[in-house]
């Protein structure tokens, strides 16, 4: 079973990548930095969901 944090994290990570690309295209360094931060936050949330899911599987 996939944890909701994995799904939310994946969307946040993808959104961050899009923001970075938009920042690159427009030359907007702030947007690019926000995208990088969102991507990292999304990866962290996704990994948290994976760990939480693995713990749940081990305790069931």
Image (tube, helix red, strand yellow):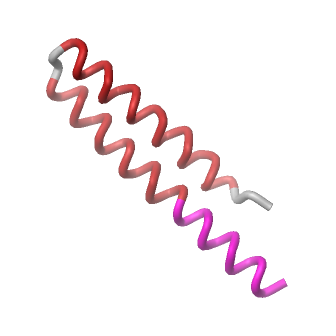
The residue at 37%/42% (across/down) is 38
Residue lying furthest top: 26
Q: How many marks?
A: 0
The residue at 24%/22% (across/down) is 23
Residues rendered magenta in the picture: 47-60
Residue lying furthest bottom: 59
Residue 17 vertical placement versus 10 (above, below): above
Residue 54 vertical placement versus 27 (above, below): below
The residue at 52%/63% (across/down) is 47
Q: In which quarter of the image is the N terminus?
A: bottom right
In the rendered image, which quarter is residue 25 located in?
A: top left
Question: Residue 60: x percent and y percent?
Answer: 84, 83
In the rendered image, which quarter is residue 50 located in?
A: bottom right
Question: Residue 41: x percent and y percent?
Answer: 40, 51
Question: Residue 35: x percent and y percent?
Answer: 32, 35
Q: In the shown orientation, is residue 28 left or right of residue 41?
A: left
Q: Main secondary structure of the magenta part?
A: helix
The stretch drawn in magenta includes residue 57: yes
The stretch drawn in magenta includes residue 10: no
Q: In the shown orientation, is residue 27 left or right of residue 36?
A: left
Nearest the camera: 25 or 7?
25
The residue at 54%/56% (across/down) is 46
In the rendered image, which quarter is residue 30 located in?
A: top left
Q: In the shown orientation, is residue 28 left or right of residue 43?
A: left
Question: Residue 27: x percent and y percent?
Answer: 15, 17
Residue 21 vertical placement versus 5 (above, below): above
Q: In the shown orientation, is residue 57 left or right of residue 18?
A: right
């Amino acid at each position: 079973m996939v944890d909701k944090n994995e799904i939310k994290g994946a969307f946040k990570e993808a959104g961050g990548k899009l923001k970075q690309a938009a920042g690159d295209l427009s030359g907007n360094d702030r947007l690019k930095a926000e995208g990088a931060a969102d991507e990292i936050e999304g990866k962290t949330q996704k990994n948290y969901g994976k760990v939480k899911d693995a713990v749940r599987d081990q305790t069931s």
